[in-house]
Image (cartoon, rainbow, N blue to C red):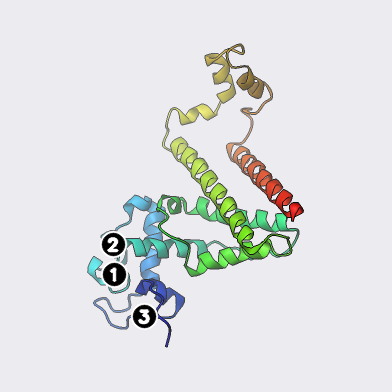
Amino acid sequence: MTEDTGLPASIEMVWGIRERPTKGPKRGLSLEQIVDAGVRVATADGIGGVSMSRVAGELGTSAMSLYRYVASKDELLWLMIDRAFGQVEATEPTEGTWRERMERWARIELTALRRFPWILRVPISGAPIMPSQLRFMEWGLSALSGTRLAADEKMSVLLLVTSYTRSFAGLSGDIAAAVDAGNPLAQTATGYGALIKKLTSAAEFPELHAVVDAGAFADEDDPADALDHDYRFGLDRIFDGVAALIQQR
């Protein structure tokens, strides 16, 4: 008999340590169908559009029929995040140096967050405990195997990298959403350097003008390429610090 985990029934079902309901008001309904419907709603309408009634409508049933499988909307959101990560085609990074493996590990998360930006709108309410999340964590720890880092230091590196990735994904996602919505301030990304020079003087903002003159805001840059460059720059600086720590060990 499986020891009680203290987890919600739906989470235990995902782990395969609790039997799935065989009877219910909607014959043929399954936990997988409910979670997939939630992912579809969030992807189409954002996390604000997700409700038990909205997901039930997607499935052609009533909200009450969902509660046999999922006790609350919060549980559904946890399940949706794990399902979304599981839908990202990725394999464990096993080749190359630890830096190369960690760079690919971080890119997997960035890809998932760009494909399912609504994930970032779900408040973090606890440590990751879902199957896809723990598998991804295992990949990250394995990427650091062979280094001189202690086990707890490896976990700290994962937290640092994932925090940076989530922050960057949120920033770039907000900018993209503003541009798509036609926000006039967001449109200043085009011709940004020229606009700075119109609004300011080199005497008042010498360092900022030096950045503009260096071509950091060149109009010919593709915004996506520029963001990708910025992400890689920050990630490399994080890895430089980790490399220094490994060398100390």
Residue that appears at 54% across and 44% down: 168
The residue where tag 3 is placed is: 20
Q: Residue furthest front?
A: 249
The residue where tag 2 is placed is: 52
Q: Position of residue 245 (x, y in %)?
A: 71, 51
Mark 3 belongs to which amino acid? Arg
Q: Quadrant of the C terminus?
A: bottom right
Between the residue at mark 2 and the residue at mark 1, the CA separation in whole angstroms equals 7 Å
Is 13 situated left or right of 147 in this image? left
Say whether marks 2 and 1 touch (CB < 8 Å): yes
Is 39 situated left or right of 160 in this image? left
The residue where tag 1 is placed is: 66
Q: Secondary structure at mark 2?
A: helix
Q: Secondary structure at mark 1?
A: helix
Q: Is 35 rendered above or below residue 230?
A: below
First of labels 3, 1 by sequence position: 3
Say whether marks 3 and 1 touch (CB < 8 Å): no
Residue that appears at 42% across and 88% down: 1
First of labels 3, 2 by sequence position: 3
Q: Position of residue 3 (x, y in %)?
A: 42, 82
